[in-house]
Amino acid sequence: MLAKASQSFTVLAMASESSKLSLPRVLAFAGIGVPLAAIGLPMGVFLAPLYAEELGLGTAAVGLVMMMLRFWDIATDPVMGWLVDCRPTRFGRIKHWILASVPILMLASVFLFLPADGVASPLYLGLWLGVLWLGFTMLQTPYASWVPMIAVDYDDRSRLFLWREILNTGTLLALLIIPTLLALYGDFARREQVMVMGIILLVTLPVSVGLACLFVPDAPPRPEDRPVAFSWPALRTALCDPAVARLLSVEVLIGIAVAATGATFLFTAEDAFGVTALAPVILLVHFVTGFCAMSGWTWLSRRTDKPLVARCICGWSSLTFLIYLPLALNGGGPVLLAFGALVSGIGFGSAPIMLRSMMADVIEREHQLTGESRAGLYYSLNSAAYKVGASFGIGIPYVLLEALAGYRPGSDNGPAEIAGLIWVFVGVPVVAYGLPVLILRNYPLTRKAYAAIKAPAAR
């Protein structure tokens, strides 16, 4: 079986060299990252504050609803992974699921981003969030599983991920600059800003999915391919794998850290640093710095080891978030807030790249050992873990702000409440980024261990 798996990998590698995607096709594939980013960024940074403050639901209610709804992904993500692995069509494995996600996402986006007057309630928010996350899973899980099908070697995967990150960052730039321009020159309140973001999503979603389905190949299973069926032992094996368990735990924590930062940044900028209109631009500094640092962290991982670099990224992020405490105590202002965003942003976005690459190593190891490709299963677990963490990243700080700190957005908060806000904004990411440094210590699937696994198959 091992020799057969090795032969399969050789054939795949030769095929990938001869059918390497052209740049226009790579861009068509990467374009799906635009609507994914258009959903992810507004959700915590703009949509949660909108429902909590302007629509009057309160931070605790919004935080609890968003936290509980993301547990829906614990069920839907593995099911979607199983469908990707086990339910291809004669036309392909991926495109039918991605196309099916479009009407679901568009319907939910209309109700969430463009709510009518007087309809907002915890039930309303929970219902349409559930529909949105269902469509998001139907788009994201097949999209992630598409990568090993169209690029099976390391360098080509890097090319796909690079262009996806470029388009993602461009989307983030647009979504952060547009609200600032609307607030400065159009007198748009947060509700109108969110409405514009919803319109952007409704336009880019069908266009990007349509281009990807037209120009990116999606090969159907070959007659000689072994059919993949759902297997409880396979799921149990994945969850009990020490490497997978650690990666999923860290995904949860990274999801908490990223979402908590986005969900509380605007509150902190306005009330702790006295920055209102420029807050989205300063958050943009955080994102752009992280994007610029990605190539440096990736370069370091090629010369050392991915688990080591992942620990360094998380350690840097945990320590540098503490810098916001003295900056706020020194009077705040846009310059000090931008400095904090710059320093802490060096680690932003790079940890998930390392973790996804480490999960790809696990998937390839299992393919070599078993001869079966269960990319859908592993990526669905990965996605579910991150999204559960992201739900905690909104729920935990929002509940802490209202229940412990006594902070109320849009109200006259005193020094004690503002201090509580700062401690929540800093404390949650410090802990969530710091724990992976311990969890990834002595991670089993290092570069050396992976080479030892591949060596027998190469002979």
Image (spheres, rainbow, N blue to C red):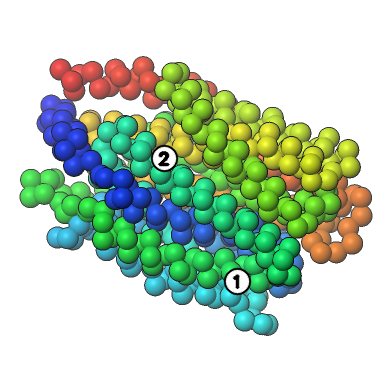
User: Label 2 is placed on what type of residue?
Assistant: Leu
Hey, what amino acid is under mark 1? Answer: Met
| Image coordinates for residue 319, horizontal then vertical, percent | 69, 30
Residue denoted by label 1: 195
Residue occupied by mark 2 = 162
Q: SS class of the residue under badge 1?
A: helix
Answer few, some or many: residues within 10 Å of disc 2's Cα (few below 14, many 20 plus, some between 14 and 19). some
Quarter occupied by the C terminus: top left
Q: Residue at x 28, y 60 (%)?
A: 213
* Image location of residue 424, percent across then percent down: 75, 46
Q: Quadrant of residue 191?
A: bottom right
Q: Nearer the viewer, residue 170 or 442?
A: 170
Between the residue at mark 1 and the residue at mark 2, the CA separation in whole angstroms equals 30 Å
Quarter of the image where one finds residue 224: top left
From the top left corner, tell me how far across and down residue 185 is, in percent.
72, 66
**Location of residue 133 in the rendering, given as x and y in whole percent from the top left corner:** 48, 62
State the residue in front, 198 or 73. Answer: 198
Mark 2: which secondary structure? helix
Residue drawn at (74%, 37%) of the image:
339
Residue 162 lies left or right of residue 396; in this view the side is left
- Quadrant (top left, top right, bottom left, bottom right) of the N terminus: top left
On screen, residue 254 versus residue 428, left or right, reads: left
Which residue is painted at 52% across and 60% down in the image? 39
Q: Is residue 442 above or below residue 166?
A: above
Quarter assignment of residue 245: top left
Where is 405 relative to 60, above or below? Answer: above
Whether residues under marks 1 and 2 lie with C-beta atoms below 8 angstroms apart, the answer is: no
